[in-house]
Image: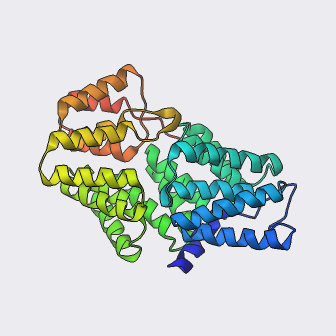
């Protein structure tokens, strides 16, 4: 499994096909060079301990060789992966991602991986889709063959609802990184976001059998379950995610959700889910979309309408095509819900 991760995640850590003022692929100092290689291997393992070790190693390298831009870009990618596979939360991770990437660009303005990291922050933390598109296109102009830049570009397009453009980027990503689990997971999520629940469920179930320790799979499966109103399935997948994520807050939430579902206490479940949504890390573009999705899954029309009305008064535009689509699917015969929901749709990015 580590070899498979190295074949895919290693490319995410360092894209060294840069065209910049410092063309070194590794530090000049042999000891730092070996430590850099070790850090790349640690990132490729994609677990909390290895990512923590990689972060420590890369920080030391940036201090010892501050002109070596790939270490800064690698540090940005380590923080990105630590959000999913480590225990760092978004409020801590995103500022560090941006700081490391901007330091890399200050040294090497044409470092593709650093542009990719900034684009990642622009979309997922700042909610600035056009800036993210510009950043990803810049990264691809510098390194067209980076499969994971194509993947992350595909992800934002799918999330925005640009399904056809996202599918093209997924195909390109698979061509450059065939078989990479992260591409398969994200493509399954995009397929769910486009409305093909059965296919997404099948893909994610297969991945869970092949890569049972990847917590992101169970995160996706929990939302797939919620999208069809399956609260038991949500609790089950949430518990599986908590088992492999090793995060105290998530474990407590999963246990409380499991208890509320088993006791069929929908009021308690609603309180838990809505508190979780309100406390979720969403950066500069906090909105009510996740709360609305939860209320929809719980079948609470009045509460959903209240959230949609609040979103209308706040002029919110919602990313998260999958959330919007599955709310619409559940309430497609409800003219009032549909009218307000349609007004949350963002314009195409491409």
Residue name at image x 29 percent, y 38 percent: 274
Asked whether the viewer can see residue 298, the reply is: no
Spot occupied by residue 180 in the image (x, y as percentages of width and height): 52, 71
Question: Which of the 4 image quadrants contains residue 8?
Answer: bottom right
Quadrant of the image containing the C terminus: top right
Q: Which residue is located at x 49 percent, y 61 percent?
A: 85
Q: Could you tell me if residue 78 is visible in this image?
A: yes
Asked whether 82 or 150 is in front, the reply is: 82
Specify whether 8 is left or right of 232: right
Residue drawn at (34%, 42%), measured in percent from left and top? 276
Q: Furthest-left residue in view? A: 264
Residue nearest the viewer, comparing 281 with 254? 254
235 and 166: which is toward the camera: 235
Residue at point 42% right, 56% down? 247
Examine the rendered structure and indicate whether residue 320 appears above or below residue 180: above
Residue 100, image x and y in percent?
Answer: 70, 49
Q: Is residue 253 above or below residue 126?
A: below
């Amino acid at each position: 499994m580590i070899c498979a991760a190295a074949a895919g995640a290693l490319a995410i850590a360092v894209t060294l096909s840069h065209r910049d003022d410092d063309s070194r692929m590794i530090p000049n100092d042999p000891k730092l060079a070996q430590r850099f290689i070790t850090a790349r291997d640690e990132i490729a393992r994609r677990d909390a301990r290895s990512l923590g070790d990689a972060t420590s190693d890369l920080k030391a390298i940036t201090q010892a060789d501050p002109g070596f831009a790939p270490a800064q870009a690698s540090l940005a990618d380590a923080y990105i992966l630590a959000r999913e596979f480590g225990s760092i939360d978004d409020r801590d991770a995103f500022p560090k991602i941006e700081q490391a990437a901007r330091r890399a660009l200050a040294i090497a303005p044409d470092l593709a991986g650093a542009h990719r990291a900034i684009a990642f922050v622009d979309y997922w933390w700042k909610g600035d889709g056009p800036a993210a598109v510009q950043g990803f296109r810049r990264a691809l102009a510098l390194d067209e063959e980076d499969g994971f830049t194509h993947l992350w570009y595909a992800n934002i397009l799918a999330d925005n609802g640009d399904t056809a453009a996202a599918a093209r980027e997924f195909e390109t990503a698979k061509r450059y990184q065939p078989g990479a689990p992260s591409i398969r997971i994200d493509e399954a999520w995009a397929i769910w976001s486009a409305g093909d629940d059965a296919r997404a469920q099948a893909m994610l179930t297969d991945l869970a059998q092949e890569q049972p320790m990847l917590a992101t799979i169970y995160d996706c499966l929990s939302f797939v379950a919620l999208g069809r109103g399956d609260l038991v399935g949500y609790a089950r997948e949430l518990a599986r995610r908590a088992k492999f994520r090793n995060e105290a807050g998530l474990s407590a939430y999963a246990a409380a959700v499991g208890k509320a579902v088993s006791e069929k206490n929908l009021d308690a479940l609603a309180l838990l889910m809505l508190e979780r949504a309100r406390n979720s890390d969403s950066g500069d573009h906090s909105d009510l979309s996740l709360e609305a999705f939860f209320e929809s899954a719980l079948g609470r029309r009045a509460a959903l309408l209240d959230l949609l009305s609040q979103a209308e008064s706040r002029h919110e535009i919602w990313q998260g095509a999958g959330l919007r689509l599955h709310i619409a699917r559940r309430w497609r015969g409800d003219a009032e819900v549909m009218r307000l929901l349609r007004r949350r749709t963002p314009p195409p990015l491409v």
